[in-house]
Image (tube, rainbow, N blue to C red):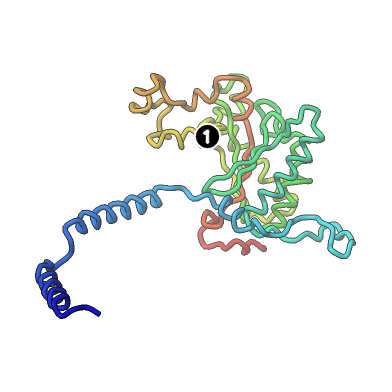
Amino acid sequence: MASPEFKNGYKKGYAAGADSVEEGLPGWFGTFADMMTLLFAFFVLLAAISTMDPVKLQEMANSEGKSLGSKIKASGKAELEGEFEPIKNLAEMKKEIEETIEEMKKESPKGDPPIDIQTSSKGLIVNIKGDYAFPIGKASMKEELKGLLDEEIIPKIENSPFQVEVAGHSDSDRMPKKWRKNFATNWELSAARGASVVRYMIEKGIPAPRLLAAGYGPWAPHGLDSVKKANPMWNPLTLTWKDPVIAKKTGTEMPTVLSLNKTEKMKSLNRRIQITFLNPPHHGKGRSATSYEE
């Protein structure tokens, strides 16, 4: 048991300690609060300038989802032809097309399918090689492209709620003189190719309001998205540009539209048809994802 002397000493020490405490927050707390405020502002800015990829977000959400498309039911009976589960989002569409690409690789002697896919904030993009799709310098579709559309692309459009943009692209070579009577520049050729595919889809029963036709000429070459990510200062209004910071570090200019057309292989990739299943926020104004019935 504590002695009276100990108790008296404890009381005096407690009183002295309480009297010595300064009012207000400790001095370090102001610096800490400033730092936390700056960190918050930094992450808000980071979120504001970032580009969300809706396909990847939906893939995460669907990681435990069921497989789609033509499948065998649990009872063991095959579904009747045309009885597919609807493709509800872009992640499911991506999975369907990836399966199609894998099948094409097995059927192709070189394992080089005529299509590839990529994702962006705009939606899910399907690239179809232009040399596979069109004769050189013409907008009339090859039979190979018609078959691909009939068997793979059009059924997926019919079975999904998305608006679709069909865009023609070209390489950066100047239009040869012998072709200028039909297409003065690559702009006209790329737009005509996009419109040709849209017209074919409409003839096959896709409602016209679901489709958009576009032509990008040589200004959106294959691989340009990677360039934009590498150089936020990229200016689409100019052919050549340089990031002085990166140039100083590496001693080289960043890639340009022309540099993405240096080889024949690059040019072949750029002469393409691009079919984009649009992320719903990019749908036409006033349209929902399912309001296309005529």
Quarter of the rendering containing residue 217? top right
* Nearest the eye: 54 or 215: 54
Q: Position of residue 286 (x, y in %)?
A: 52, 62
Left or right relative to 147: residue 237: left
The quadrant in which the N terminus is found is bottom left
Q: Residues within 10 Å of mark 1 (few under 14, many from 20)?
A: some
Q: Is residue 252 above or below residue 111?
A: above
Left or right relative to 135: residue 12: left
* Residue at figure coordinates x 62%, y 29% from the top left: 269
**How many numbered circles are shown?**
1
SS at badge 1:
loop
Q: Position of residue 86 (x, y in %)?
A: 72, 60
* Residue at figure coordinates x 72%, y 31% from the top left: 132
* Nearest the eye: 51 or 269: 51
Q: Is residue 34 above or below residue 148?
A: below
Q: Residue furthest right?
A: 77
Left or right relative to 49: residue 133: right
* Nearest the eye: 87 or 213: 87
* Nearest the eye: 86 or 31: 31
Q: Position of residue 95 (x, y in %)?
A: 69, 49
The quadrant in which the C terminus is found is bottom right
Amino acid carrying label 1: it is Ala
Q: Is residue 238 above or below residue 29?
A: above
Quarter of the rendering containing residue 70? bottom right
* Residue at figure coordinates x 66%, y 45% from the top left: 198
The residue pinned by badge 1 equals 220
* Residue at figure coordinates x 70%, y 46% from the top left: 97
